[in-house]
Image (spheres, rainbow, N blue to C red):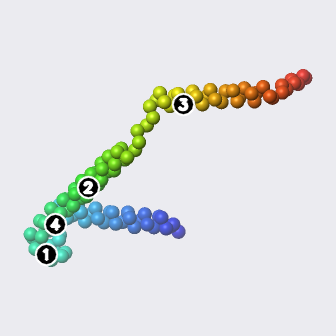
Amino acid sequence: MASKDQAIGGIILALCVALAIIYTVTLFYPSWLTSVFNVETTWVSDAQFWVVALPVFIAFIAIMFIGAWIGWTMATTPPPKPIEEITSEISEEKEETKPAEESVEEKKPERKKKTE
């Protein structure tokens, strides 16, 4: 038995294959529209135009949206700290933790070595 996700995936697959076939047939053999839908031949040439124009328009808008999103992200993201500032913070943290570590080590009693 297929899960819900697999069923949805199968439906998406079937729809995409069907749309790809309809797109290809409409683009290269537009006369099928006149026989199936009983429409005028001028409408068929318009359909051929829209079969090409609509995906190109959608792709163009999608690319422009991605570009706008990248620009917005770059414009609203604060600049990173300079490397010098980061390295100075790291060295300051190391200096602060060294005395604390040394004092902890000094408080520990030495263990006696076991002899065999």
Q: Position of residue 116 (x, y in %)?
A: 90, 23
Q: Quadrant of residue 78?
A: top left
Q: Secondary structure at mark 3?
A: helix
Q: Characterize the local packing of mark 3: few (<14), some (14-19) or many (20 or more) Cα atoms within 10 angstroms.
A: few
Residue at which label 1 appears: 39
Residue at screen point 47% across, 64% down: 6
Amino acid beneath label 4: Ala
Residue at which label 4 appears: 47
**Circles 2 and 4: CB distance less than 8 Å?**
no
Q: Position of residue 37 (x, y in %)?
A: 18, 76
- Badge 3 or badge 4: first in the primary sequence: 4
Calculate the distance from the C-alpha at mark 2 to the C-alpha at mark 4.
Answer: 21 Å
- Badge 3 or badge 1: first in the primary sequence: 1
Disc nearest the viewer among 1 and 4: 4
Q: Secondary structure at mark 4?
A: helix
Residue at which label 2 appears: 61
Residue at screen point 30% across, 50% down: 68
Residue at screen point 28% across, 62% down: 20
Residue at which label 3 appears: 89
Calculate the distance from the C-alpha at mark 1 to the C-alpha at mark 4.
Answer: 11 Å
Amino acid beneath label 2: Ile
Calculate the distance from the C-alpha at mark 3 to the C-alpha at mark 1.
Answer: 75 Å
